[in-house]
Image: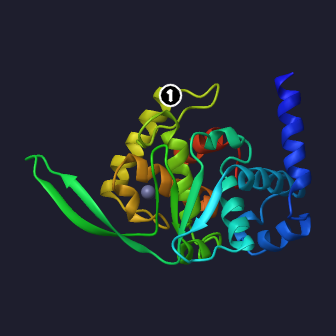
Amino acid sequence: MFNLIKDWREQNILEASRFSEDDWRQVADQLAVLSRLSEEELRKLFDLATLFLHDKSIKGVKDFVVTDSMKQSIALQACLPILNLGLEWYKGWSSIIVYPRSYHTKTTTTDEMGIVHEGTQHRSGEAWLRGPVVLSWREVKHSGDLDGQNVVIHEFVHKLDMLNGRANGFPPMQAGMNPEQWTQIMEEGFSDFQRNPKHGIDRYGATNPAEFLAVLSEVFFERPQDLIEAYPDIYQLMTEFFKQDPML
Ligand SMILES: [Zn+2]
């Protein structure tokens, strides 16, 4: 019964959408990262992105205008990792804030001596625990073109990671996955990556296990071959976690 109501609600949202399939297709055509999807998968992604735009608000900072096609581009890329997982993987928060370009933010860190350091950091996006996702449009515009970097996938994978608490590189597992195996393979990969840079994988992934997961997810969707060559075991784990295989 619950599923019937849910399907009915979703059906109403899909029917009320102001975007036609052609509208979605025009935006999707600009995103090479979607080109491997079958016709059926693409349609599924359009529906998911429509529901996503209904559930989440996307707003520009100050007077920066986020157009419909910008919203669609963000929604399509954000929904790619959850294509076979469902929108409930993005539950518990509701807004996306878009800056025109990368921005500076005040940071506070406390070192081992207990001294608090204030600084500024250059950022192209961030994801807050139970809060918004923040994106720089300039970086989003350069995402999706198969260069291995995708700020949208990066930030939204942090959101998946945060479903069970702070981002730590350990998101909730899918049924049938072995958490110990995930921890072991990811930890081995992370300590290797800290010592040995890999072709096509951003060094930023060596920052901590959460960034390692987010950066490798960008590569998984954008340049799967690079990830298979560097870390075949992690690639395999990711096909189980995301329930899709970008090499197929
Ligand atoms: Zn990050």
Q: Left or right? Give the position of 213 relative to 197.
A: right
Q: Is residue 1 above or below residue 93?
A: above
When asked about the image quadrant of residue 70, the answer is bottom right
> According to the image, label 1 marks what residue?
179
Which quadrant does ligand 1 occupy? bottom left
When asked about the image quadrant of residue 150, the answer is bottom right
Residue 209 locus on image (x, y percent) = 39, 46
Decide which of 177, 229 is in the foreground and name it: 177
Decide which of 151, 92 is in the foreground and name it: 92
Give the residue displayed 75% in from the left and 75% down from the top: 30
Give the residue displayed 65% in from the left and 43% down from the top: 242
Where disc 1 sits, the SS reads: helix
Residue 27 locus on image (x, y percent) = 78, 72
When asked about the image quadrant of residue 196, the answer is bottom left
Amino acid at pointer 1: Pro
Number of other residues with Cα within 10 Å of mark 1, as a class: few under 14, some 14 to 19, many 20 or more: few
Examine the rendering and report whether any part of residue 68 can be seen.
Answer: yes
